[in-house]
Amino acid sequence: AQSVAQPEDQVNVAEGNPLTVKCTYSVSGNPYLFWYVQYPNRGLQFLLKYITGDNLVKGSYGFEAEFNKSQTSFHLKKPSALVSDSALYFCAVRDRGTGFQKLVFGTGTRLLVSP
Amino acid sequence: DTGVSQDPRHKITKRGQNVTFRCDPISEHNRLYWYRQTLGQGPEFLTYFQNEAQLEKSRLLSDRFSAERPKGSFSTLEIQRTEQGDSAMYLCASSLTVGLAGSSSYNEQFFGPGTRLTVL
């Protein structure tokens, strides 16, 4: 069965500093991996995805993520955090090996960027 | 606004009542998904449609839940005889998938703002 772990409930970082939000996954086959962000009272917004190819994926708002197959990780990164990046971040996986289309989400990591 | 829309945004009901939610996907998207999100958790998959065909259903989708997408456009999710445990945010998403079934192409899902259900 597919699963996603986001080991940190909250990440605190000062504005201008680099940030990392961690994600590890488990699938039986090869994964499709996604990051979404959720602002209060709003739906999830897509940030970036890994399907195949280059392990470093660049997405919206300056975010990027690195796929590491040996460590089954897909950590979200940004070189310089902004206060406006404060939100709830979700990692999600779909098992490419199955015919199923569902995304399995982690429990989310709250990012708090202080001025 | 060309995004995914959901109606209503909030619904408060008494236990035992039936409720129905509507989702309008992005117009050219052929796949539509329903998820449920409870406080402190990530979204959990409920079901998905490709055009008008319902192709996957989660075990979370008990027989009190039914979803339809009659013309392959908007979708409705109905919960009969609501229970307090049904209180959650119900999220709809859509995606456009082209190519043969089982192909490696996969496009991201775009989510609506959700319908927050409170069962008293």
Image (cartoon, grey):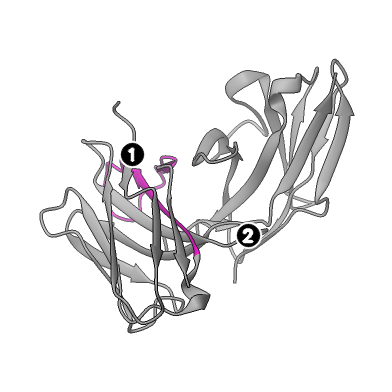
- Residue B95 part of the magenta segment: yes
B7 horizontally vs A19: left or right: left
Q: Residue at x 58, y 53 (%)?
A: A93
Q: Mark 1 points at which residue?
A: B4
Of all residues, the one furthest to the left in this rendering is: B71
Q: Kindly identify the amino acid type of the residue bearing the numbered disc 1.
A: Val
User: Do we see residue A99 in this rendering?
Assistant: no
A3 horizontally vs B13: left or right: right
Q: Nearer the viewer, residue B27 or A41?
A: A41
Q: State which quadrant residue A18 falls in.
A: top right
Residue B71: x, y in percent?
10, 54
Mark 2 or 1, nearer chain start: 1
Q: Give the overall secondary structure of the magenta segment.
A: loop
Q: Measure how far apart labels 2 and 1 are at the Cα level.
A: 22 Å
- Residue A112 part of the magenta segment: no
Front label number (2 vs 1): 2
The numbered disc on residue B39 is 2
